[in-house]
Image: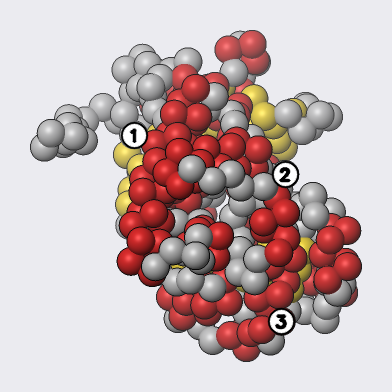
Amino acid sequence: MVVFDVDGTLIGGESTDWTCFDTAFLEVTGRELNREHFVALKEVTAKACIHQVLDDLPLAERNEKEAAVEARYIVLLREAVKANPGALRATEGAVELLRDLRARSVPIAIATGDWRESILIKLAAAGIPFEGIPIATSSENYARSEIIAAAVAAAGRTLDEAIYVGDGPWDYRATMKLGIPFVGVGSRASLLRKEGALNILSSMEPKEFWRVRTLMGASQPPMRAAEAPMEWSSPEGKYFVSTDRRLVDLGVVCALLAASYWASDRPRDVIAQSIEASLNFGLYRRESGGQVGFARVVTDGCTFSWLCDVAVDEAERGKGLGKFLMASLMSHPVLERTKVVLGTRDAHGLYEKHGFVRQELMRRNKPSPAG
């Protein structure tokens, strides 16, 4: 199984993160933090940092300070994300790697030195598809090695099955304590090598991950048959449709849905999670690989499928690409063997050409936050 650190590993924007943390610490304690503090610390987790820097205070007072710093940090983090939604971004290839591992049935978990509430804010802001992934944090454990072990246990696995992917020397030291393999990534590669780390990724792209894992002696598990990508080429060869989730451009899909009448206000993190939980059909230019269309299917794989979020870039319309996208997805084995349902306000003619008939349906809208 693969266990991931978050800050500097799955997501970037550490300058924003550190500014919020340092400010919260200064406001609550009246003391300033600097990077030298963290180099000298034995443990680098949110909880451990506060308790080590404030080790001259009684335990009860340190606990109070920790709670106050955490609360203020969360407020500042929310404000920073609201002011600049792009401040925290997924690192290159991170989303694709998570999807690739899931497609290969490789168990994954998250072990972070951050507190639980703050890390969930950051994962959502960065568009990381974390739903269903076991997460262990500094809210439950003091030491990073304890956090990693807790994440492995939460996934129902044992340490002898795990590797840890992280960006800090403290990550490497935690794996040495646990006796598990370490894979480094991020901007601290030189520091990791000084610590003794041998396996360093140049990016989080799936190809790079499996290259390094192969050098470490690990085999690359095959895709699950049900999730192995399928591809269709347009008659003239200029476009293709693929079910490979690794090709999906989240930014393009968000833009397509923002221009739709049914999902114009759907949040980016919700779109990312919906892609993770669906059978996706991306429409791409053959020459450049750029995405120009999208559709997804929510299905149990054997009896029922819901076709939704069908969209083609306005600049590409009038070329028959909507018909090509529909013909491709309707020939997928899952859709061939299941009842397929969809909803539309203005494209009945397109869908009727593929065997759909108009029929009244009942639906329950999502309840409001107030219930």
State the residue at coordinates (59%, 18%): 313
Quarter where residue 346 is shown: top left
Q: Earlier in the sequence, mark 2 or mark 3?
A: 2
- SS class of the residue under badge 1? loop
- Front disc: 2 or 3: 3
Residue contact at pointers 1 and 3, CB within 8 angstroms: no
Residue 314 lies left or right of residue 271; in this view the side is: right
Q: Residue type at mark 1?
A: Leu
Q: Position of residue 180 (x, y in %)?
A: 68, 82
Residue contact at pointers 2 and 3, CB within 8 angstroms: no
What residue is shown with label 1?
A: 342
- SS class of the residue under badge 2? loop
State the residue at coordinates (64%, 42%): 14
Q: Position of residue 79 (x, y in %)?
A: 44, 29
The 10 Å Cα crowd at callout 3, few under 14, some 14 to 19, many 20 or more, is some
The 10 Å Cα crowd at callout 1, few under 14, some 14 to 19, many 20 or more, is some
Q: Position of residue 369 (x, y in %)?
A: 18, 34
Which one is nearer the viewer's eye here, 261 or 341? 261
What residue is shown with label 3?
A: 176
- Quadrant containing the N terminus in the rendered view: bottom right
Check the image and name the residue furthest to the front.
56
- SS class of the residue under badge 3? helix
User: Would you say residue 302 is visible in this rendering?
Assistant: no
User: Would you say residue 59 is visible in this rendering?
Assistant: yes
Q: Residue type at mark 2?
A: Glu
